[in-house]
Image (cartoon, rainbow, N blue to C red):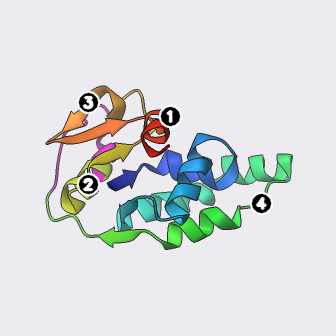
Amino acid sequence: MKVVLDTNVLISGTFWSGEAFSILQFLEQKKFQCFLSQEILNEYNKVLRSDEIIEKVEEKHLAIKSSAIKAIELVQIVTPKRKIAAVKDDPDDNKIIECAVEAKVDFIVTYDSHHLLKLKEFEGIKIISPSEFLKMLK
């Protein structure tokens, strides 16, 4: 099974236990293949260094989970060749779809209910929530 994880899933899985962390553990166990683009990784790194995340980490004395870091190391990087404008309200989300199309994945997994989840599907790629994806993995 081939998947693109949205940045919000990557961040959640990096800092907090829960659905996203479980997904990263399944990735570490190689239960599915994960594809990202450099653009998604850049966004992930930018969010990691944001004041909001730094503040939350300092407040709760959280550390980046080593298994999340290992999981990120297991992803395959693709370079999207096609520009897609499927998300009109938040064009920044199009990079997730572009990556998914390039990698020919089965699923995009996201918490983004305002934009991506509303689409439900793009060119045969199903867009699902982390809880839906976990049900499939178990």
Name which residue type carries label 1. Ser
Pair 2/3: label in front: 2
Q: Is residue 93 magenta?
A: yes
- Do the numbered discs 1 and 4 sit on residues whose CB atoms are within 8 Å? no
Amino acid type at circle 4 is Ala
- Across and down, in percent, residue 118 comes to 31, 26
Q: Amino acid at mark 3?
A: Leu
Pointer 1 residue = 131
Q: For residue 63, which numbered disc appears in the image?
A: 4
The tag on residue 105 is 2
Between the C-alphas of marks 2 and 3, the distance is 16 Å
- Magenta stretch, main secondary structure, is loop
Q: Amino acid at mark 2?
A: Val
Q: Determine whether, in the image, residue 104 is placed left or right of residue 114.
A: left
Distance Cα–Cα, label 3 vs label 4: 34 Å
Which residue is at the front of the view, 8 or 1? 1
Residue of label 3: 119
Could you say whether the residue bearing mark 3 is in a helix, strand or loop? helix
Q: Which quadrant of the figure has residue 54? A: bottom right
Range of the magenta residues? 83-95
Asked if residue 136 lies left or right of residue 49, the reply is left
Whether residue 71 sits left or right of residue 79 in the image: it is right
- What SS does tag 2 mark? loop
